[in-house]
């Protein structure tokens, strides 16, 4: 069964924006991380470090948002499959949260390294 529509740049962009608006309406974690991202981007612009260091901070900051989006997708799929408590469903959600935690930790470590060694 193939329910995948034919590729269309405009329709695919519409789907992506639809997903973004859904996440902005429903996911508090993403909204909070997006708010932090605004301040982080301003800080990256202001901080006096090399372009490479700024790029590392920007990439790891955006990576946090990307991983949070993937975590939200995992949580939605798990909720679609079962509303009842299931150990594997909990594990899937916990692993997604761990990925976000690791990504945030990586971003913080990059900030520390840039500040201490730049």
Image (cartoon, rainbow, N blue to C red):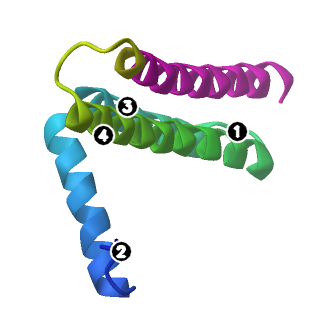
Does label 4 or label 1 sit earlier along the sequence?
1
Q: Quadrant of the N terminus?
A: bottom left
Q: Is residue 33 above or below residue 4?
A: above
Which SS class for mark 3?
helix
Tell me: 5 left or right of 44: left
Which SS class for mark 1?
loop
Mark 1 to mark 2 CA distance (whole Å) = 51 Å
Residue occupying the point 39% across, 31% down:
36
Q: Position of residue 69 (x, y in %)?
A: 39, 42
Does label 4 or label 3 sit earlier along the sequence?
3
Q: Give the magenta-colored segment's residue range.
A: 91-118
Tell me: 55 left or right of 18: right
Mark 2 to mark 4 CA distance (whole Å) = 18 Å
**Most extreme residue toward the right, as rendered?**
117
Q: Which residue is mark 1?
A: 48
Does label 3 or label 1 sit earlier along the sequence?
3
Q: Position of residue 116 (x, y in %)?
A: 80, 18
Mark 4 to mark 1 CA distance (whole Å) = 43 Å
Which SS class for mark 4?
helix
Q: Is residue 95 above or below residue 70?
A: above
**Label 2 near label 3: C-beta < 8 Å?**
no
Q: Which mark is residue 33?
A: 3
Does label 1 or label 2 sit earlier along the sequence?
2
Mark 3 to mark 1 CA distance (whole Å) = 24 Å
Q: Position of residue 86 (x, y in %)?
A: 31, 15
Is 114 part of what is drawn in magenta? Answer: yes
Residue occupying the point 76% across, 28% down:
114
Q: Residues within 10 Å of mark 4 (few under 14, many from 20)?
A: few
Number of the front mark, 4 or 1: 4
Q: Which residue is mark 2?
A: 2
Q: Which residue is mark 4?
A: 77
Mark 4 to mark 3 CA distance (whole Å) = 21 Å
């Amino acid at each position: 069964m193939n329910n995948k529509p034919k590729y269309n740049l405009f329709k695919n962009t519409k789907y992506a924006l639809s997903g973004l608006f859904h996440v902005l309406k429903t996911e508090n974690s993403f909204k909070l991380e997006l708010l932090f991202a605004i301040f982080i981007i301003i800080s990256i612009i202001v901080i006096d470090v090399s372009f490479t260091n700024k790029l590392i901070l920007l990439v790891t900051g955006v990576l946090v948002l990307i991983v949070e989006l993937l975590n939200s997708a995992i949580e939605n799929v798990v909720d679609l499959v079962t509303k009842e408590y299931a150990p594997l469903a909990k594990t899937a959600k916990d692993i997604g949260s761990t990925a976000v935690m690791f990504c945030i930790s990586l971003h913080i470590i990059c900030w520390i390294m840039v500040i201490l060694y730049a």
